[in-house]
Image (cartoon, rainbow, N blue to C red):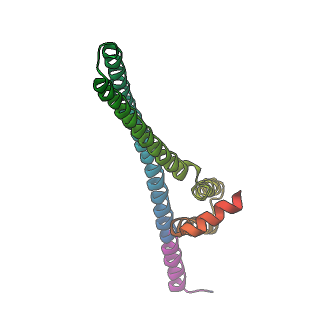
Amino acid sequence: MKSIDARAYEMESLKNREKSAKDALKSLQDQNEALRSALEEAKEKLQETRKNVTEQIRKEWEEEQKKKKEAEQLLAQNELTAEKNQESVLRSQVESANKELKELKEKYDNLRSKHDFEVKELFENQHTLKFVKQMKHYKDEWWAKTGDEDRKKIATQMASTTKSWVSATKEQIEAEEKQQH
């Protein structure tokens, strides 16, 4: 038969383990919430960036179209009466406007490819999607299993998965992407 001191020690030990498990759970829940918040913030920022870039490109395109149209109208008005060197100047203006338009198109294409890359990194990255799916699975397990030992195992798995996701190198992520395809 165990002494009262031994039982008290066991009770204190169990309380300490329970507190450690609760602290670990709280930490993982905080990390999960921070990740969710960061993802939402990134989505909002991406939407705002997309809106701003689209608006900026539209304005620049309209301006260039207006300049091109003005240059073409000026060319049409002066074409009948202008001397050859005046025609040359007007043509160079049209060429300049076309050059600027081409540069804006290249700028748009560059911004578009950057946008597509960011979307892929945020929403199509298999490594991140796999991590989110695992976390959802752990959450379901957590609510399904209420025993301390089960929850300790789940918390350990969550911590391990989070550590793996955060510390993955670019090469590991690329290798994982290649295996997926």
Can you give x and y, in whole percent of width and height, for residue 15 in the image?
A: 50, 72
Residue beneath the point at 62% across and 59% down: 146
Can you give x and y, in whole percent of width and height, for residue 175 in the image?
A: 64, 66
Q: Quadrant of residue 172?
A: bottom right
Q: Nearer the viewer, residue 50 or 149?
A: 50
Q: Is residue 50 magenta?
A: no
Above-or-below relation of 51 to 22: above
Q: Quadrant of residue 133?
A: bottom right
Q: Quadrant of residue 144?
A: bottom right
Residue beneath the point at 52% across and 45% down: 116
Task: Look at the image and tell me in which quarter the C terminus lies.
Answer: bottom right
Answer yes or no: is residue 106 visible.
Answer: yes
Is 151 displayed left or right of 110 in the figure? right
Above-or-below relation of 112 to 140: above
Above-or-below relation of 128 to 103: below
Q: Nearer the viewer, residue 45 or 22?
A: 45
Q: Nearer the viewer, residue 179 or 64?
A: 64
For the magenta stretch, what is the residue range? 2-18
Predominant SS of the magenta segment: helix
Q: Nearer the viewer, residue 35 or 65?
A: 65
Residue beneath the point at 61% across and 64% down: 174
Task: Look at the image and tell me in which quarter the N terminus lies.
Answer: bottom right
Q: Is residue 10 magenta?
A: yes
